[in-house]
Image (cartoon, grey):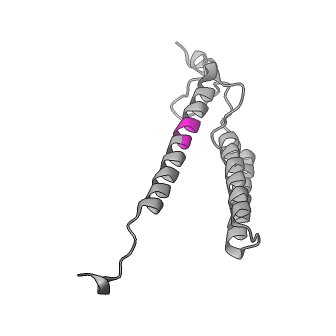
Amino acid sequence: MSADAHASHGHDDAHGRGHDDGRDHGSFKSYMTGFILSVILTAIPFWLVMTGAIENKNWTIAIVVAFAMVQIVVHMIYFLHMNTTSDAGWTMMALIFTVIVVVIALSGSLWVMYHLNVNMMPVHDMRNMP
């Protein structure tokens, strides 16, 4: 098979050129857009928590979680290049698997922390010990 035939099939040559398999691999502009959005989506919740800008802790938690969910979407679009035109649904399968793993990890962590908090032994005063 000639070098031209390899290039037309999207194979790389010895120098890494000719890699055109029809998928979006990102550009400098898209990576910088994702990076700037990630910095903003990190800085705002950090500022909210560190300054105590919102008095109600429940609202602060809700806002931080909302920013985290938006940041997950930004990472999936700009860094993982997930879109609706992927090959044979593999991207959607990866997304579903990731969501399942994250839900299991978060719910398990919260469950463990809650039960540790509820079931911890109270601190006893050592002076009243027999």
* Front residue of this view, candidates 29 and 86: 86
Residue 25 part of the magenta segment: no
Residue at far bottom of view: 127
* Residue 84 screen position, x and y as percent: 72, 27
Magenta highlight range:
98-103
Q: Is residue 121 above or below residue 5?
A: below
Let me know if residue 99 is in the magenta part.
yes
Q: Is residue 14 left or right of residue 34?
A: left
Furthest residue toward top: 1
Instruction: Judge by depth and name the residue closer to the eye, 31 or 77.
Output: 77
The residue under the point 71% across, 24% down is 85
Q: How many marks?
A: 0
What residue lies at 67% left-to-right and 73% top-to-bottom?
50
- The quarter of the picture where residue 37 lies is bottom right
In the picture shown, does residue 117 fall above or below 128? above
Residue 20 screen position, x and y as percent: 65, 27
Residue 6 seen in render: yes
The main secondary structure of the magenta stretch is helix
- Residue 115: image x %, image y %? 46, 55
Snapshot quadrant of residue 120: bottom left
- Vertical placement of 87 versus 78: above or below? above
Residue farthest toward the left in the current orientation of the protein: 130
Q: Quadrant of residue 130?
A: bottom left
Q: Is residue 35 visible?
A: no
Q: Is residue 27 above or below residue 57?
A: above
- Residue 56 position, x and y percent, is 73, 67
Q: Is residue 102 left or right of residue 37?
A: left
Seen at 70% across and 40% down, the residue is 77
